[in-house]
Amino acid sequence: MKAIAINASPRKGKNTEQLLRSALDGAAYMGAQTEFIALYDLNYTGCTSCFACKRKGAESCHCYWQDDLSPVLDKVLSSDILFLGSPIYFGDITGQLHCFLERLNFILMTYDDYNKQLFNGRINTCLFVTMNVTKSMYETLYEQPLLNKIKPLERLGGKIKLYGSYDTLQFDDYTKYQAAIFDEQHKKKIHEEIFPKDLLAAYEIGRQFAQ
Ligand SMILES: Cc1cc2nc3c(=O)[nH]c(=O)nc-3n(C[C@H](O)[C@H](O)[C@H](O)COP(=O)(O)O)c2cc1C
């Protein structure tokens, strides 16, 4: 059993990374081998339309483009559990995760038949998103578009889950920034009282996925 976490936040050790590490800990508790990959440490592009993966005789579900992401895609497809993590940027996942998903989704589909299942394995997948907005704003504005975004990952053959962590702590010291719309006391209270529950929930998802 192998679990991979892909961090699409540029901030090391912050909200998104903490959730991913907690999910990996849950999977590790059940005996999974774990690996953490930071997308912002890698040099890569989105799909370049080289179409090498669509050539007759091409290896199924393999990205032929050569950059730092290519070996990561191979690793992902040889795993059993995939945790993706992204902060919300302008109502969406980060550009880095978009590029990752372009590459992954394209090798999972064929122009012979959009409904054909190319990938033979089963990878349980969870996208963790962290954000400034509250739960109700998330549910109104972001949740459905994000569910649509991860739907193509059904091609991985496993469970698909979306987990939101709201009202996150963005700065350690809000007084150093021009950020009058945020109430530092409120943010710190959420971080101390709610965020630990998100970490526990992530751990539980990791544990269940590895069962
Ligand atoms: C460029 C940028 C755009 C952002 N846009 C949004 C947004 O549209 N909605 C939101 O709720 N939070 C937004 N945020 C806040 C982050 O999503 C939030 O702080 C997140 O928890 C950061 O994750 P991290 O601590 O792992 O980096 C934005 C932050 C940045 C830097």
Image (cartoon, rainbow, N blue to C red):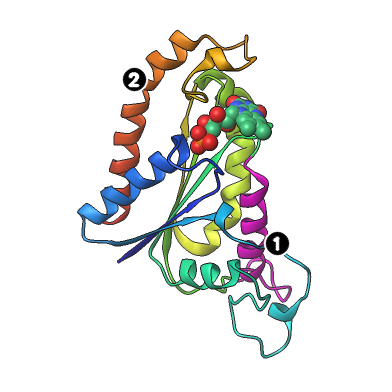
**Which element type, helix, strand or loop, lies under badge 1?**
loop
Q: Position of residue 45 (x, y in %)?
A: 70, 61
Q: Is residue 173 left or right of residue 66?
A: left
Examine the rendering and report whether any part of residue 109 can be seen.
yes
Q: Position of residue 192 (x, y in %)?
A: 34, 20
> Can you say whether 95 is above or below 109 in the image?
above
Instruction: Please check the rendered image and state whether residue 104 is part of the magenta-colored stretch, yes or no.
Output: yes
Label 1 – label 2 distance at C-alpha: 37 Å
List the residue tagged with mark 2. Answer: 192
> Can you say whether 14 is above or below 114 in the image?
above
Residue shown at 59% from the left, 66% from the top = 69
List the residue tagged with mark 1. Answer: 45
Q: Amino acid at mark 1?
A: Thr
Q: Position of residue 154 (x, y in %)?
A: 53, 57
Part of the protein shown in magenta:
93-116
Q: Is residue 64 left or right of residue 41?
A: right
